Image (cartoon, rainbow, N blue to C red):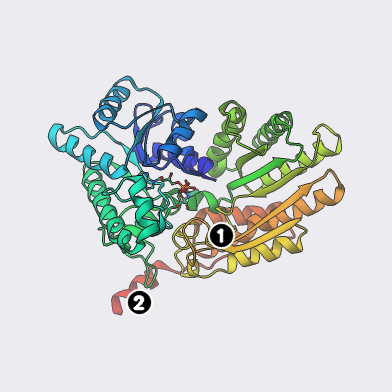
Amino acid sequence: MGKDNMLTVLNAGRKYLGVESLSGKVFLTSGLGGMSGAQAKAAIICGCIGVIAEVSEEALKKRHQQGWLQEYTPDLDVLIARIREARAKKEVTSIGYLGNVVNVWERLVEEYESTGDLLVDLASDQTSCHNPYKGGYIPVSLSYAQSQKLLAQDPAKLKPLVEESLRRQVLAINRLANAGLYFWDYGNAFLLEARRAGADVSGKQVAEGADTTFRYPSYVQDIMGDIFSLGFGPFRWVCTSGDPEDLQKTDLIAAEVLESICQEGIPERIRQQYTDNLRWIQQAGKHNMVVGSQARILYSDQEGRVRLALAFNQAVRTSHLKGPVVISRDHHDVSGTDSPYRETSNVYDGSAFTADMAVQNFVGDAFRGATWVAIHNGGGVGWGEVMNGGFGLVMDGTEDAAYRASLLLNWDVANGVARRAWSGNDNAEATITRSMTQDQRLKVTLPHHADQTLISRALDSA
Ligand SMILES: NC(=O)c1ccc[n+]([C@@H]2O[C@H](COP(=O)([O-])OP(=O)(O)OC[C@H]3O[C@@H](n4cnc5c(N)ncnc54)[C@H](O)[C@@H]3O)[C@@H](O)[C@H]2O)c1
C-alpha cells in the first residue's frame, strides 16, 4: 500500500507549498522497512529530494541494493552537506541516513538556529508507531541492537525511552514547523502515540469526544479523505500467470480504459485524479516496483474499477493474457476501513467511531460474489483502533466473473461514498449523485444540510 499512497501524498505536497513542481524541495521522513521502504522511490518519482533515516542497517542496505535508495551515509555532517548540495542543484534523489531520525531532526534545528537555513520543506514519519513499545519505534538513546536487546530482556524499561524520544522528535518538528516546514501524519499513528507520550501535538478538537485532531493534519484529513470521497482508492490486480508480460499488457489495457473514460467526458472535480493516474500507469512499468507477484496498484473510482475489471476479463477470455487476473484493493480505501485515526479521520459526524462501514462492505461484497472476503482488526494503526473489510475476485474470462465484478465493485465503492456524503463531505455528495445518474438502480438517501444560521443561533443561546 505504502508507495501508491505516498505518491499521492507527496504530490499533494505541491498543494501545501503552493508550487507546481517539487523540484529542489526536501522531504524528510524515516523508515525503509516493509511499506516505508517505498518512500525513497516515491521521492524520486515525484521529483524531489527524499531524506530518509533508518536505524536498521539491514533494512537500509536492502533498499539501497534494490535501487530504491540512491545513496546513504551514517555521518550527519555528510548528510547535511549533501542536503545543501542537492537543494542548490535541484537534484532528484533519495538520500538515506543510517541512524535515528531524531538525530536528523535535532541537527536540522541546530542548522536553522545557527544559519537561518530551513533545510527541509515537507516532512512525515513512517516508523512502526502503531506498535511503538514492542520494537516499532527505536528510541534515540539506544542503537538498533541495544533496543532489540532491551525489548527482549526488559521491555518495561524500553517504554520511557520511547516516550522521551517521541517528545524530543516532536519538539524539533514543532520548532521547524514554526519556521515554515509542512509536517503531516502519514497513517502510522505517530501523532496519536506522540500525544500519549506527552508530546505537544494538540490541536483544536472539532467535536465532543472526537479527539482525532492534532496540531498537524493526518494525510487522510488533509488529502486522502477528499480523494476517498470522490470514490478513488488503491484498486489492484494480480496476474496469476506470474508472467511480467501479462502485467505489461494489463498496464496498457488500463491506460486505454482511463483514456477512453477521459475522452467520454468526466466532471472537472475528478479531472486531476484521472490525469495523475493515467500518467502513473503509463510510467509504472519503468519504475521496476514489482517485488514478487506480478501485481499493480492504480487509484481508480467506481466507474474506472468496473471498466478495468471488465477489460481484464475480456483479455483473459480472448487469451490475450496467459492466465486469470485477480482484482482486489487495499484496505486503505474508500469503504473498506473504519479507522478514526486514519481512513475515517475526516468523517466528523461521530460515525468514525463505529465499524459498520467495513462490516457492510465485507458482507455486501460476499453477497455480490467475491471469490473471498476478509474482515479483520488491527491493520495499520494497530489493534483495537481499526476494522477492515476486504475482498478478492478472480476474473477468469467468464460472463459470470464480469457480472460479479460489476455488482461487487459498484457496491464496494458506493457504500463508502454514501457514508462519506452523509457525514457532510461535498465531494462524496457530488460523487454519489453522479453514480445514481449513471446507474438508475442505485438509490441513496442524500444528506439533509442543516441551516448554518440555525446552528449558530442555537450555539449562541446555549
Ligand atoms: N499510510 C499508509 O498508506 C501506510 C501503509 C503501510 C503502512 N503504514 C504504517 O507505516 C508504518 C511503517 O510500516 P512498515 O511496514 O514500513 O513497518 P516496518 O516496521 O517494516 O518499517 C519501519 C522502519 O522504521 C525503522 N525505525 C523505527 N524507529 C526508527 C527511528 N527512530 N529512526 C529511524 N528509523 C526507525 C525500523 O528500523 C523499520 O525498518 C506502520 O505503522 C504502518 O502501519 C502506513
- Residue 273 at x, y = what percent? 55, 40
What residue is drawn where x is 14% and y is 38%? 113
In the picture of the structure, the residue carrying the numbered disc 2 is 458
Element type where label 2 sits in the image: helix
What residue is drawn where x is 63% and y is 52%? 434
- Looking at the image, which is closer to me, 39 or 100? 100
Question: Which amino acid, by three-letter code, is at mark 1?
Answer: Thr
What residue is drawn where x is 32% and y is 61%? 159
Cβ atoms under marks 2 and 1 closer than 8 Å: no
- Residue 12 sits above or below residue 356 on the image: above
- Residue 78 sits above or below residue 238 on the image: above
Answer with the quarter of the image where residue 256 lies: top right
Tell me if the residue at label 2 has its CB under 8 Å from ligand 1.
no
Answer with the quarter of the image where residue 92 lies: top left
Element type where label 1 sits in the image: strand
- Looking at the image, which is closer to me, 358 or 152? 152
Mark 2 or mark 1, earlier in chain: 1
Question: Which amino acid, by three-letter code, is at mark 2?
Answer: Ala
Q: Residue furthest front?
A: 153
Left or right? Give the position of 380 relative to 293.
Answer: left
What residue is drawn where x is 54% and y is 54%? 229
The mark lying in front, picked from 2 and 1, is 1
Is any atom of residue 289 visible in this view? yes
Count residues near mark 1 (Cα–Cα under 10 Å), then give few for <14, some for 14-19, many for 20+.
Answer: many
- Residue 161 at x, y = what percent? 28, 56
Left or right? Give the position of 425 relative to 140.
Answer: right
Image quarter in which the C terminus is found: bottom left
Q: Which mark is residue 337?
A: 1
Answer with the quarter of the image where residue 314 lies: top right
Is any atom of residue 265 visible in this view? no
Count residues near mark 2 (Cα–Cα under 10 Å), then give few for <14, some for 14-19, many for 20+.
Answer: few
